[in-house]
Amino acid sequence: MERAIVARVQGSTHHESVVRWARQEATRRGLALRVVRDGPADGLNDAQLVVAGARDPDGVMFPACPVVLVPETPAAQRSALPGAEIVLGVDAREPAQAAVGFAFDTARMRGVRLRAVHSWRFPACAAELRFGVPEEDRATWEDHEVQLLADALRPWREKHSDVHVLEDVRLLPPARALSRRSASAGLVVVGWSAEREPGPTLRAVLAEALCPVAVVPT
């Protein structure tokens, strides 16, 4: 069967937004669009990309391909605006390569900037400091995180030299950092291990994001 963008409207309460987003993406990628209104998830294994509603109870249970979950907010239509950046959530210590690749390819295809967001937290030893974290220590730790992200992205930047990349290191929980950036993004991209149930971070991103979220299986 021909590879296609599949819009899954089963369980979604905003079918029009899901189908509209899928149609736009199919046009960008030069692929066919298929709308699935019922049927089991395993019938979507030939899809190159699945688009579903963010409240679809089975939305992320398609391990064979990336899934884009479209929220029920007017801000979700920002993804249709030209120039809206792609936001990639990346763990610089263990980057999800499939998600990184998907984000770079999408940014290149749309001709927009890719913002790579890496969240970090103080090391455990910081809790033992009686008078808080000295600015010098914070700067040293943050510089280390910045270097980790630069090292993780270097091979991808060399491979996709035509993609403008902004490296964004945040002292915030991952879900909060991504939800804040989603306010001006066309798409947020995150990785997910298909061997596990969605964890609290992924669930929080899906609940709080103001734009569509692409969940890419590792």
Image: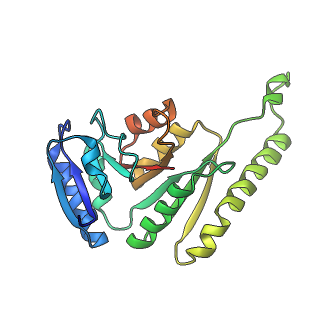
Residue 41 x/y as whole percent: 27, 42
Considering only vertical position in the picture, is 146 above or below 31? above
Which residue is located at x 31 percent, y 52 percent? 45
Which residue is located at x 16 percent, y 45 percent? 15
Q: Nearer the viewer, residue 59 or 210?
A: 59
Considering only vertical position in the picture, is 218 above or below 166? above
Q: Nearer the viewer, residue 36 or 181?
A: 36
Q: Quadrant of residue 32?
A: bottom left
Q: Nearer the viewer, residue 171 or 10?
A: 10
Colour theme: rainbow
Considering only vertical position in the picture, is 110 above or below 6? below
Residue 38 x/y as whole percent: 15, 42
Residue 30 x/y as whole percent: 27, 73
Quarter containing the N terminus: bottom left
Q: Nearer the viewer, residue 173 or 130?
A: 173
Considering only vertical position in the picture, is 8 above or below 153? above
**Picture mark count:** 0
Which residue is located at x 39 percent, y 62 percent? 84
Q: Residue furthest bottom?
A: 162
| Residue 140 horizontal side relative to residue 6, left or right | right
Residue 47 x/y as whole percent: 29, 57
| Residue 23 horizontal side relative to residue 97, left or right | left
| Residue 87 horizontal side relative to residue 141, left or right | left
